[in-house]
């Protein structure tokens, strides 16, 4: 049994706890009926089961003071109370799980934003819609810009449009000429204001389009589903990343009000606002806080009360020298993925395909003259369900279109052919074979 390796440690812990219980006036070690050593998920626990029948009062055994005393005697190892199957002390003998020191970006996952890994190396990912507006904060050098580039890379690969503010010119210089930019990169408060106003104008255009659409779409995905069904063009998501947000807002106070309105209206029309700042002391943050769904806090010296209202109080514990480690309001501690900035310099994508998607496009071009209908995909080994969900998703992206001249079958569009060609060029440029993973999720 693997737990036998822990027998000696278990004896020492049991003896120490018993000594403390005997030392304290209101407790007695003989109240521990038995000791249990168990293993669960590679963790070994020692339980001291209390004899509840004989206990006159539980409090002396379960008070914070007693637990603290027990823990101190074990040099700080936590002593917990468990009450699921009878009252017992619980001490973890194996080391507590550690966050990985770094996590390399594993590759794109279609339709998802991948963010990093949490405890036990669980991958953290979500959709852009569910990510919502975001606040990214941390002291200088804590990893904000690296994280923002990770988001920008995935936004580009999905075919989203970017609106960037980079007053120091250090986060996104490699994207200055990028065709996916909705407007040129803003360098100061006035330009950032113009950029958010432009996004707000786009929301108003979209509002008209949504209103004309039978079926009353409630968000961008639904609108795109409806519009492509009637042969129209889907709308891209807009991702705004405002680096050094507080500095920008100091320069141009009107920026806050526009961001508040954009935050509120943008959710429905496919806008993600990302506020990035090292400074959480200013009022500005308070005024956009209500719009923010996801908070990512790297190493920070912000006050506990501010962090608490943002739901990331534990970010206080993150030490300097752990760049990329963040506390989030939604997934707890996350080691955010590291994406080498060189990847963005070498080949900032304007939409990219995953490896599997690329193969499908090649096959359609070489075998079916570009036709990619459900029966075609089923013929290539997909289930009917997978095939339907793929063609519907690609149709919404404007990648497939029905051709009335050819029995209304779906064919790949020039847009998709171009993305496939770009993907191929990007893959030839790069030697990293693991940049693309997964498929549609
Ligand atoms: N996720 C990560 N994994 C590993 N190292 C990282 C990660 N993120 C950042 N770093 C390292 O930390 C350094 C600082 O990162 P970055 O420039 O992103 O910080 P920042 O918060 O934007 O700083 P500033 O406030 O000065 O702009 C980088 O040079 C990078 O090497
Ligand atoms: Mg930075």
Image (cartoon, helix red, strand yellow):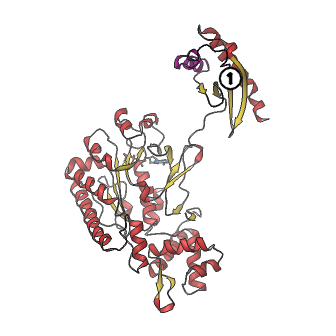
> Looking at the image, which residue is at 61% across and 74% down?
384
Residue 371 x %, y %: 55, 84
Residue 380 x %, y %: 64, 78
Residue positioned most to the top: 25
Residue positioned most to the right: 1
Give the image quarter of residue 287: top left
Image quadrant holding the N terminus, namely: top right
Residue 269 x %, y %: 34, 64
Task: Note whether 286 is above or below 229 in the view shown.
Answer: above
Residue 218 x %, y %: 37, 64
Q: Give the residues drawn in magenta, as a range.
A: 47-74
Task: Note whether 184 is above or below 125 in the view shown.
Answer: below
> Looking at the image, which residue is at 61% across and 13% down?
56
Residue positioned most to the front: 53
Helix, strand or loop status at disc 1: strand
Image quadrant holding the C terminus, namely: bottom right
Query: Is residue 422 shown to the viewer in this render?
Result: no
- Other-residue count near label 1 (Cα within 10 Å), few / some / many at <14 / 14–19 / ≥20: many
The residue beneath circle 1 is 49
Give the image quarter of residue 149: bottom left
Is residue 380 found inside the magenta-colored segment of the image?
A: no
Is residue 57 found inside the magenta-colored segment of the image?
A: yes
Would you say 397 lies left or right of 278 here?
right
Of residues 174 and 258, which is closer to you in this image? Answer: 258
> Looking at the image, which residue is at 69% across and 27% down?
46
Query: Is residue 408 shown to the viewer in this render?
Result: yes
Would you say 320 lies left or right of 366 here?
left
Would you say 185 lies left or right of 220 here?
left
> Looking at the image, which residue is at 54% across and 71% down?
389
């Amino acid at each position: 049994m693997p737990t036998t390796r822990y027998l000696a440690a278990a004896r020492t812990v049991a003896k120490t706890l018993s000594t403390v219980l005997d030392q304290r006036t209101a407790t007695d070690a003989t109240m521990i009926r038995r000791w249990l050593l168990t293993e669960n998920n590679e963790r070994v626990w020692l339980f001291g089961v209390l004899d509840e029948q004989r206990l006159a009062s539980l409090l002396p055994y379960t008070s914070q003071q007693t637990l603290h005393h027990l823990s101190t005697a074990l040099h700080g190892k936590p002593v917990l109370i468990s009450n699921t199957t009878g009252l017992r002390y619980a001490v973890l003998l194996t080391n507590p799980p550690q966050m990985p020191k770094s996590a390399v970006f594993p590759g794109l996952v279609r339709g998802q934003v991948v963010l990093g890994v949490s405890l036990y190396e669980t991958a953290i990912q979500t959709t852009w819609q569910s990510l919502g507006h975001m606040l990214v904060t941390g002291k200088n050098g804590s990893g904000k810009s690296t994280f923002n580039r990770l988001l920008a890379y995935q936004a580009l690969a999905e075919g989203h449009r970017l609106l960037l503010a980079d007053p120091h010119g250090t986060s996104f210089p490699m994207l200055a000429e990028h065709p996916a930019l909705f407007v040129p990169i803003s360098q100061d408060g006035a330009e950032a204001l113009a950029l958010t106003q432009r996004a707000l104008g786009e929301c108003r255009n979209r509002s008209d389009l949504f209103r004309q659409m039978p079926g009353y779409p409630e968000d961008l995905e639904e609108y795109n589903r409806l519009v492509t069904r009637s042969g129209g063009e889907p709308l891209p998501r807009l991702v705004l990343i405002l680096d050094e947000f507080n500095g920008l807002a100091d320069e141009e106070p009107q920026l806050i009000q526009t961001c508040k309105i954009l935050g509120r209206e943008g959710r429905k029309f496919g806008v993600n606002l990302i506020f990035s700042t090292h400074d959480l002391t200013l009022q500005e943050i308070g005024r956009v806080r209500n719009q923010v769904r996801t908070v990512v806090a790297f190493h920070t010296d912000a006050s506990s009360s501010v962090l608490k209202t943002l739901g990331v109080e534990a970010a206080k514990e993150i030490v300097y020298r752990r760049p990329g480690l963040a506390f989030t309001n939604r997934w707890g501690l996350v080691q955010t993925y590291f994406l080498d900035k060189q990847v963005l310099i070498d080949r900032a994508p304007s939409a990219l395909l995953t490896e599997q998607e690329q193969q499908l496009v090649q096959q359609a071009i070489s075998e079916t003259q570009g036709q990619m209908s459900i029966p075609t995909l089923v013929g290539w080994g997909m289930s009917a369900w997978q095939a339907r969900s793929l063609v519907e998703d690609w149709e919404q992206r404007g990648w497939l279109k029905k051709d009335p001249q050819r029995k209304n079958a779906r064919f790949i569009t020039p847009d998709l052919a171009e993305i496939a060609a770009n993907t191929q060029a990007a893959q030839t440029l790069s030697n990293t074979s693991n940049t693309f993973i997964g498929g549609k999720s």
